[in-house]
Every structure is written in structure tokens, then in C-alpha cells.
Image: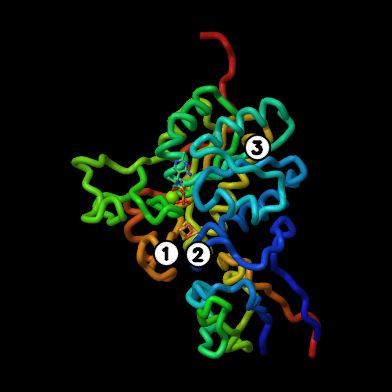
């Protein structure tokens, strides 16, 4: 079960793709369907169940585009 | 089950419609470190930033919600000196590129060190003049191609790269000097520690704090943001070793010869 979740601000993300390489759990993927207003493909949380809210993608996002959430409590 | 936000935009980051930096530029990550450190050390209310000419000229003041001004090319240490001497309670820092600090402003920087100013300098080493289209800088690697060294920097007629962190460490007025990167998660955390230490030396009145960042410049390096990370680890770090070159808690200010 997913322990975390990230949101990517489509207005701020410039599609550099660094977060995809930094995520050691392979959660993020570039989506050809989601383009920034400059026309570059942006990442999406393609494998949400794998996210463990480690925050690495958000630390290293140069565009302040990623927020990280943690699941708390039980389902 | 509920969702709790655990990490997001630092409160000292201004709201901007979009980044002023190129995609994959590390300056944004460095701005994040500055915002987080200023908040953690709780001096944002008395911080004064001075940006050099270069991509940090507008980029840092626009990104960081603290008192900030931009300076004539290379002159940030002189303006910072005035600010610090008029407002000794303020925490005054410069953010300068390698063309700014290392070429046109090298004298100004060295004189600030010689005068024993208690400032903090964040030095952005991207091995070229980013803003103006990638000309050779004092930090350009031997053999590295830039628009003004199209066949690669030739040390025979262009000399050797400037090692600013080692130079700063050598100066008696400097309390802290380090070289860091933000090209891996572990290095991001080390960089944050270095910036914290460099500010702490000023806050404690110990001496000058200096942090050099090796920073990616994808458009002028002609590399993708991801390939820039390899360039940093394989090429930049071969010339510029990372580490803390000086960290002292006390400098001898006595007048006794
Ligand atoms: C007195 C003066 N000379 C030249 C310039 C043109 N100029 C603007 S930015 C720049 C280079 C800045 O390079 P660097 O400090 O490495 O910053 P970067 O863009 O790489 O962040 C130059 C030469 C200027 N603005 N002022
Ligand atoms: S030119 Fe280089 S240093 Fe300037 S914003 Fe673009 S990537 Fe960053
Ligand atoms: Mg530069």
C-alpha cells in the first residue's frame, strides 16, 4: 500500500525530468499527454503505490513544483 | 486514512508564475537551500542578500522573500561590506556567479577577505558565463568547449581553472570554506549543512563563510539535465574536489604581533 503521494504543479514544472531519475522507487514517468506551457512533457506519479514519501524528488526539483504528502492513520 | 503534507515550498520562497531559470538549472535547488536554511536559523527578518550579475542577478532576489538587491558586476562584496558595517546586526550574504566573483569581481572579493569582513558568500560555479550565452569563465575546465573557447579551453594561453573554495580557505579571515553540489540527494543534504555552517560563522561573529556550488547549466553545457549530473560527477568533481576546506570556531583577532 502506498505510504506517500506527490503532487506536481503543472504551472511550475519545466519538464527537466530530474525527479524521474532521482526517485529510487521508479514512481514517476514523463507523460507525453501532459505538456508544460513551454511544450515540454511533464512527469506524473505513474506508480502511486510505490511512493514512500522520501521527499527526494521535491528536494531536488529546481522549480519548486513538487509537494509531498504522507498517508497517516489506518484505512 | 488521511493525507498530511510533509514537504513543500519553503515559506521564504516567493510566489512566481514560473521559474526564471532554464529547465534543469541547479540555481533553483540552491535557492531552496537558502530559503530552508534562513528559515531554520530564523534570521530571515534580518537577512540582506546581494546578488551579483549573472543568472542569480534577478533569479535569487525574485525567488527569496528576504531583503535583496542586485549589484553592479562583481561588486556584491563591496555592497555587502557597506550593508554589514551600517547594519552589524544583519546577516549579509552575496550570491555570485563564477564570471561575477572570479573574473570581473575577483579583486573586490579578495579585498573583502583581506579586510576581514564577516559576510557569507554563495559562489555559483557553472564553469561559464551562463546569462550571456556560455562564454569561458575563470572556472571553465581545461578542454571544455565554450563560445569563446570553441576548440576547448587551452591552459597554455587561457590558464588554469580558479579554485575559489581553496583560495578562500587559505585566507586568514575566513572561518568556513566548502565546495558542494546538489547533484544527488546525499549531496543536497551536505550542501544544506555547509550553507548553515557558513551563515553560522557570520551570526557568531567568527569570520567569513564561503560555500562554492558546482552547478549545472544544461543549455550552455549542451547537455540534458540528466547528463549534466554525470558531467558534474565525472568532469567537474575531477577538477574541483568536494569537501570542507576550512571550519574553525575561532580566529585570532588580537593585535599582538
Ligand atoms: C560591467 C558589466 N560587464 C558585462 C556585463 C554583461 N554580463 C552580464 S551577465 C555576465 C556574465 C555572468 O556570468 P556568471 O557570473 O558566471 O553568472 P551565470 O550567468 O553563469 O550565473 C556578463 C559578462 C554586465 N552586465 N556588466
Ligand atoms: S543559463 Fe545556465 S545558469 Fe543561467 S538559468 Fe540557464 S541553466 Fe541556469
Ligand atoms: Mg557562471
Is ligand 2 less than 8 Å from the beta carbon at label 1? Answer: yes
Q: What chain is tagged by disc 3?
A: B
Residue B74 at x, y = what percent?
49, 37
Is ligand 1 less than 8 Å from the beta carbon at label 3? Answer: no
Residue B46 at x, y = what percent?
75, 40
Viewer-side residue, B203 vs A8: A8
Q: Residue B71 carries which label?
A: none
Is ligand 2 less than 8 Å from the beta carbon at label 2? Answer: yes
Instruction: Look at the numbered disc 2 and give the secondary structure of its residue.
Output: loop
Residue occupied by mark 2: B22
CB under 8 Å between discs 2 and 1? yes
Q: In which quarter of the image is the N terminus of chain A?
A: bottom right
Instruction: Look at the numbered disc 3 and give the secondary structure of its residue.
Output: strand
Q: What chain is tagged by disc 2?
A: B
Viewer-side residue, B32 vs B75: B75
CB under 8 Å between discs 3 and 1? no
Q: Which residue is drawn at 62% across and 67% down?
A: B18
Q: In which quarter of the image is the C terminus of chain A?
A: bottom right
Instruction: Look at the numbered disc 1 and give the secondary structure of its residue.
Output: helix
Q: Residue at x 43, y 54 (%)?
A: B130
Residue occupied by mark 3: B92
Residue occupied by mark 1: B218
Residue B238 at x, y = what percent?
32, 53
Instruction: Report, in whole angstroms, how far the alpha carbon at label 2 lies from the one at label 3.
Output: 27 Å
- Indicate left or right for B1 with B110 as reference: right
Q: How crowded is mark 3: few (under 14 residues within 10 Å), some or many (20 or more)?
A: many
Q: Which residue is drawn at 61% across and 69% down?
A: A58
Viewer-side residue, B22 vs A22: B22
For residue B60, above or below residue B163: below
Q: How crowded is mark 1: few (under 14 residues within 10 Å), some or many (20 or more)?
A: many
Q: Which of marks 3 and 1 is nearer the N terminus?
A: 3
Amino acid at each position: 500500500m502506498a505510504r506517500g503521494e506527490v503532487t506536481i504543479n503543472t504551472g511550475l514544472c519545466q519538464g527537466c525530468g530530474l525527479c524521474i531519475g532521482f526517485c529510487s522507487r521508479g514512481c514517476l514517468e514523463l507523460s507525453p499527454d501532459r505538456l508544460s506551457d513551454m511544450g515540454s512533457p511533464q512527469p506524473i506519479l505513474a506508480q502511486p503505490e510505490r511512493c514512500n514519501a522520501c521527499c527526494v524528488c521535491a528536494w531536488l526539483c529546481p522549480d519548486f513544483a513538487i509537494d509531498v504528502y504522507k498517508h497517516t492513520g489506518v484505512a | 486514512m488521511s493525507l498530511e503534507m510533509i514537504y513543500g515550498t519553503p515559506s521564504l520562497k516567493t510566489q512566481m508564475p514560473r521559474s526564471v531559470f532554464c529547465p534543469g538549472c541547479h540555481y533553483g535547488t540552491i535557492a531552496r537551500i537558502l530559503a530552508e536554511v534562513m528559515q531554520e536559523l530564523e534570521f530571515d527578518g534580518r537577512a540582506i542578500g546581494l546578488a551579483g550579475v549573472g543568472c542569480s542577478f534577478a533569479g535569487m532576489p525574485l525567488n527569496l522573500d528576504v531583503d535583496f538587491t542586485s549589484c553592479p558586476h562583481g561588486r556584491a562584496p563591496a555592497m555587502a561590506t557597506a550593508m554589514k558595517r551600517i547594519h552589524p546586526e544583519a546577516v549579509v550574504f552575496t550570491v555570485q556567479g563564477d564570471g561575477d566573483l572570479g573574473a570581473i569581481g575577483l579583486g573586490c572579493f579578495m579585498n573583502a577577505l583581506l579586510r576581514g569582513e564577516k559576510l557569507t558568500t554563495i559562489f555559483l560555479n557553472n564553469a561559464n558565463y551562463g546569462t550571456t550565452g556560455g562564454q569561458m569563465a575563470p572556472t571553465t575546465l581545461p578542454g571544455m568547449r565554450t563560445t569563446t573557447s570553441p576548440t576547448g579551453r587551452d591552459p597554455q594561453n587561457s590558464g588554469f581553472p580558479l579554485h575559489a573554495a581553496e583560495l578562500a580557505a587559505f585566507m586568514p579571515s575566513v572561518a568556513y570554506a566548502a565546495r558542494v553540489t546538489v547533484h544527488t540527494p546525499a549531496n543536497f543534504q551536505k550542501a544544506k549543512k555547509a550553507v548553515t555552517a557558513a551563515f553560522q560563522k557570520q551570526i557568531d561573529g567568527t569570520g567569513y563563510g564561503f560555500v562554492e556550488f558546482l552547478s549545472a547549466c544544461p543549455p550552455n553545457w549542451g547537455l540534458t539535465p540528466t547528463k549534466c549530473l554525470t558531467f558534474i560527477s565525472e568532469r567537474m568533481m575531477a577538477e574541483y574536489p568536494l569537501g570542507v576546506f576550512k571550519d574553525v570556531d575561532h580566529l585570532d583577532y588580537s593585535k599582538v604581533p
